[in-house]
Image (spheres, grey):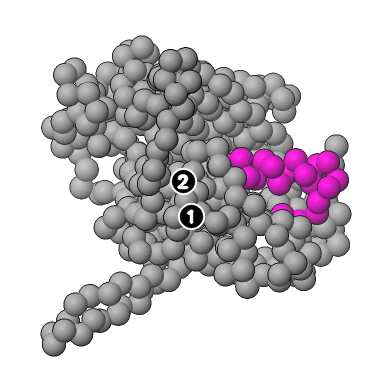
Amino acid sequence: MKPAYIVSAFRSPVCKAFKGALRAKRPDELCAEVIQGILARTAKFDTAEIDDVLVGCAMPEAEQGMNIARFTVLLAGLPDSVPGVTVNRFCSSGLQTIAMAADRIMAGQAHCIMAGGTESMSLIPMMGNKVVASRAMNSLDPAAYLGMGMTAENVANEYKISRSDQDQFSFESHQKAVHAITAGLFKSEIIPVNASSRLPAAGGKVTVKDTTVDTDEGPRADTTVEALNKLRPAFLQAGGSVTAGNSSQMSDGAAMSLVCSEEFVKRYNLKPIARFAGYSVAGVPPRIMGIGPVAAITKACKLVGIQQHQIERIELNEAFAAQALAVVRSLNLESKKINPTGGAIALGHPLGATGAKLTATLLHGMQRDRQKWGLVSMCIGTGMGAAGIFELI
C-alpha cells in the first residue's frame, strides 16, 4: 500500500453560533476561504491536478445543501475540472473525509485531494430544518433519537462521572485554551477569514461593517469552577449533571487538509507534515454514544500496529465533559496528553468541521513539540466513535 501524506492542515477561527462573528457567513464561502488560504501557503502545482475535494458536513441542507463541496470548489476559484463531494458521518465528518482521501491515495487511485469539513450552526439548526424519524427505529431502538445531552447524562450515570469532575474538566479546558491563544499557539494553524455585519444607522440607512476574524471566540478567561458549579442541568432537571458549562459550544467553522501521494510530494518538492497512519470507526449502543472513542481508538491502534502508550498527543473532541472523562478513564489515558491547548468545551464544536479542525490543531502541535504519534478521536451521534492516527514526518 502506498503512503498518504498530509501536506497542509489549516482551519478558520471557530466562532460562537448565533451571536459570533461568523453567524451570517455562508459555510461554503467560509470553507472556500480556507481552501484559498491553504493554496496560497502551499501550492507549487497547477490546481487542476487536485483530484477531488471532500467536504464533511453534519447537516447538509438549506445553506449547506446542494452538494456544498462542489459549490465550495467553485467559490474557491478552482478549475471547473476539480470535482467535489459532500460527506456526512455527523461529528466525525471532517476526519472521515481525510481518511477517505488517504484511502484513495494509498490505493493508488489519486495523487492530490483536499479534504476537511465546514459547518454553520448559526444557519442550520441541530437535526436540520425537518426531521423525519424512521418508524422502524422507533420500535427497534428509539435511543437512536435521544438528544445528545441525554446520552451524556446516561454516560455520566453509567460511568460514575460526578458533576464536580465534569466542571473541573471544563474549567481546565478553558484555561488551556486561553493560555494557547495568549501564547499565540493557534496562529500557525488559523487562516483569517472575512466577515461582514449590517447594522441600522440614523436616517434609516444600513451600515455594512467588514472585519477580519483571526481568533477563536469561545474560551473564557473569567470562567471559574465556582461559576460552573452554579449552572443548572440543561437536559435532565431532576438529578442531572450535564450543563451548558460542561458541554461543547455550538459553533461555526471550517477546516481543510491537503492529502497527497509520495509521487506528488516528490514531483513538486512539497514538505509533508505527517503520514496518515490509519483510521477506524466503531459502533456502540446509541444511548451511550459518547463512549464511542473507546472502541474506535482500540481498533485504530491495532490497525496501525502501535501500542496506545506510544501516542504522545490526543485531540479528543469534548462533546461533553462526562463522555470525555468516561473515555479517558476507560482507556486509562494520560491527562497531560489530552487536548493540551483546550477542547470543544472552550473552543467549540462546529460539527462537520470538527474532525478536520482537530487534525490541524494536532499536527501543528506535534510539529511544535516534535512528537511522533498523534491521534484525533470523537464520539458520533446515534452510537459511534472514530479515531485517526498520524505519524509526524
Is residue 112 covered in magenta? yes
Residue 121, labelled with which disc?
A: none
Q: Nearer the viewer, residue 169 or 39?
A: 39
Question: Amino acid type of disc 2?
Answer: Met
Question: Percent x, y for residue 242?
Answer: 26, 27
Q: Is disc 1 in contact with disc 2, using a CB cutoff of under 8 Å?
A: yes
**Disc on the earlier residue, 1 or 2:** 2
Quarter containing the N terminus: top right
The residue shown at (71%, 71%) is 79
Q: Quadrant of residue 237?
A: top left
Question: Percent x, y for residue 376?
Answer: 56, 37
Residue 59, labelled with which disc?
A: 2
Graded by Cα atoms within 10 Å as few (under 14), some (14 to 19) or many (20 or more), the crowding at tag 1 reads many
- Region in magenta: 95-113
The residue shown at (69%, 42%) is 100
Magenta stretch, overall SS: helix
Q: Nearer the viewer, residue 217 or 165?
A: 217
**Eyeballing the image, is 210 above or below 322?**
below
Q: Secondary structure at mark 1?
A: helix
The residue shown at (61%, 40%) is 96
Q: Which residue is mark 1?
A: 64
